[in-house]
Amino acid sequence: MNPVTTPSEDRILNCDTKDASGLNDFHRLPDLYGIDIDKVGINRFRIPMNYRHKDGTVMNHDTEASMYIHFPKGKAGINMSRLYEILQQEAARHEVDSGLFKAILGRYRADMRDNDDEEKYKDAYLKLRFNYPLKQPALKSDNYGWQYYQCILEGREDKTGTIRMFLTVHYEYSSTCPCSLSMSKQYESEYADSTTDEGNGMAVPHSQRSEARVTVELPFESDFFVEDLVDLLRAAIPTETQSFVKRVDEQAFALLNAQNPMFVEHATRRLSLALNAEKRIVDWVASVEHWESLHSHNAVAVIRKGVPGGLK
């Protein structure tokens, strides 16, 4: 095996490739390895971006962007600052929608080149992470709060110009263990019948905060909003954690949990039914985690639509 080739100190200090200002332009030097790289770029780039909500309002959300291109052999590196320069320019012109992704991904494949006569880069990627606030009515009282959903909107363009779009939403809910609920009610019945005198006649089933992380693939230029996916998740798993609670809401939440006891197996199958019923969703995968209050470990399940070669 050949030893790893690294740029020599002399080559770095005496770079013969200059940029327009006369500074050493090291990334334009020849590739020492001759190896393609699947993704090259940056992540955790923070930028405020405008998002249109389903009701027509436009809100500015703090966003963390990840930007990549497929980098072929032949050069030492890419101009990283050009990635976020393009992002900032297009974000100033567009709200976050399919048009923004089309503009940015197309420019990544074309404008990241050093010369116009080079082939366009084969693949380009853009991923936006943001918190999406939605009003959440209280369960029973005449109040509301703001529920914030961790979201990821991702686009990928390949060498044919085809763009695939993906939306991920983190959904928090409460899960009551069916087994624990059953045993609690069994004990309370036995205590009432005087077949046991253990305890005080009341037993509390264990429940816990839980999370479903759902990723859906959407048709390009779809009219599907974050709200649409949240509505599907709420219908599948109605025990969503609450942002505004009075005592009457707390009691209503206890009743709701008792009506919807679930293992992770139940939760994933509920999600499957809801997601498969939405025709605008091309593909989907869901990961469910119950942060157990009984155990020191968590219960986890993963389910997907099962499209050949699809999301995993």
Image (cartoon, rainbow, N blue to C red):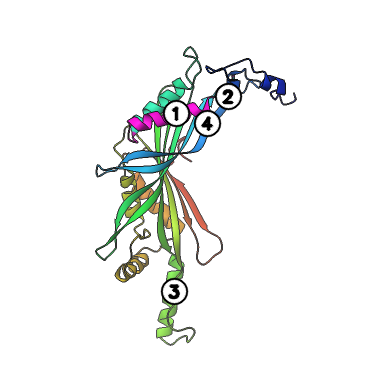
Q: How far from the left and from the top, in percent, is residue 245? A: 33, 65
Q: Which residue is mark 4?
A: 41
- The residue carrying pointer 1 sits among few (fewer than 14), some (14 to 19) or many (20 or more) residues within 10 Å by Cα, namely few
Q: Which residue is mark 1?
A: 85
- In the rendered image of this protein, does residue 76 appear above or below residue 213? above
Number of numbered discs: 4
Give the SS element for disc 2.
loop
Task: Specify the segment rendered in magenta.
Answer: 74-97
* Mark-to-mark CA distance, 2 and 3: 60 Å
Q: Which residue is mark 2?
A: 77
Classify residue 198 as left or right of residue 256: right
Closer to the chain start, of discs 3 and 4, is: 4
Closer to the chain start, of discs 4 and 2, is: 4
Q: Is residue 10 visible from the viewing direction of this image?
A: yes
Closer to the chain start, of discs 1 and 4, is: 4
Furthest residue toward top: 117
